Image (spheres, rainbow, N blue to C red):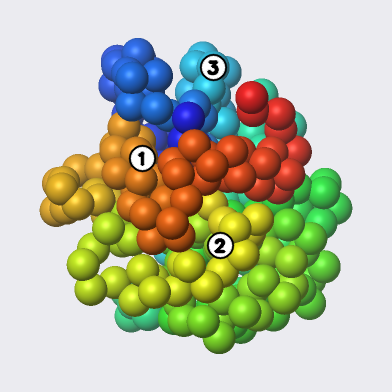
Amino acid sequence: MWIDTHAHLYDFSDNDIQNLCNRVDSASVGAIVSTATDLKTSKNVITHCVKYPGLYGAVGISPFDCEVIPSGWDAILEQNLHEHNIIGLGEIGLDTTNPRYPSFEKQLPVFEQQLYIAKRLDKPVIIHSRGFEKSTAEICRKNGCQKAVFHCFTGDFDAASVILDYGYYISFSGILTFNKAAIRQLLPKLPLDRLMLETDTPYLAPVPFRGKTNTPLYMQYIGNEAALLIRKSPDELQAQLKVNFNTVFNVCIK
Ligand SMILES: [Zn+2]
């Protein structure tokens, strides 16, 4: 079974999630991490995780949503981390690639405050970082972050090396299946015991669904492509990914 370590399901209705859960077995998906971006979506993630087995959740404030947050947000977030099957903070991070996002000066304190919570509660973090991966890894380390997954990684070998040096993990999305993606050359150079895979639903659907709405049910297209690129069988890769996931998120998926 594959594990989708990053999917945005918070806008799914109960019906949508039920349909998804009914079909995960036949799509070889054993677990999904439903990832939030702010307090409102964190609430949805928590509700879904209580109702649906096989669903894990990450709660947090993303760099795009750090502009308008209520005072006391950090205490609420900390409470959220104690809810059923909530396994970490995410997605959180830094992104300077889009001028429409809040400024770096706004993003940084919210990010660092969440790293502080993660450190204090000993929780892993799921990191969003675009064009800024190396510095983000350095900020994680500076803030005493022990366990981090750099999600939807599109950085270069240099950035990957820094992330790995600090003991963190790298997760690849369906971009792996895109013909010209540089990460196709990068993946085989990385140690397997630091790897994760994800759909990043609803974005970035893998080939042959590129351009369509993504779903965790497409996880196998990403997994099989990754297995091909590293010349392992899908079974071997799944076994390693399961160990990685259980190690980082302190769970016991069989
Ligand atoms: Zn995401």
Q: Quadrant of residue 16?
A: top left
Residue position marked by numbered label 3 in the rendering: 53
93 vs 73, left or right, is left
- Name the residue tied to disc 2: 170
Q: Earlier in the sequence, mark 1 or mark 3?
A: 3
Name the disc covering residue 126, or none: none
Q: CA distance from mark 1 to mark 3?
A: 18 Å
Q: Residues within 10 Å of mark 3 (few under 14, many from 20)?
A: few
> Helix, strand or loop at disc 2?
strand
Residue 62 appears in the figure: no
Residue that appears at 30% across and 44% down: 221
Q: Which residue is mark 1?
A: 219
Numbered disc 3: secondary structure: loop
Q: Nearer the viewer, residue 202 or 48?
A: 202
Q: Amino acid at mark 1?
A: Met
Q: Is residue 177 left or right of residue 162?
A: left
Kindly identify the amino acid type of the residue bearing the numbered disc 3: Pro
Where residue 46 sits, quadrant-wise, is top right
Q: Between tags 1 and 3, which lies in front?
A: 1
Q: CA distance from mark 2 to mark 3?
A: 26 Å
Given residues 85 and 235, the one toward you in this image is 235
Residue 170 position within the rendered picture, expressed as x and y whole percent measured from the top left:
56, 62
Residue at 65 percent across and 56 percent down: it is 193
Asked if disc 1 and disc 2 are in contact, CB closer than 8 Å, the reply is: no
User: For the residues marked 1 and 2, what is the alpha-carbon distance in whole angstroms?
Assistant: 16 Å
Residue 108 visible in the shown view: yes
Crowding near the residue tagged with mark 2, few <14, some 14–19, many ≥20 C-alpha atoms within 10 Å: many
Mark 2 or mark 1, which is nearer the start of the sequence?
A: 2
Label 2 beta carbon within 8 A of ligand 1: no
- Is residue 54 or residue 145 the one in the foreground? 54
At a point 23% along the width and 63% down the height, the residue shown is 178
Q: Tell me if residue 24 comes above or below residue 141 in the rendering.
A: above
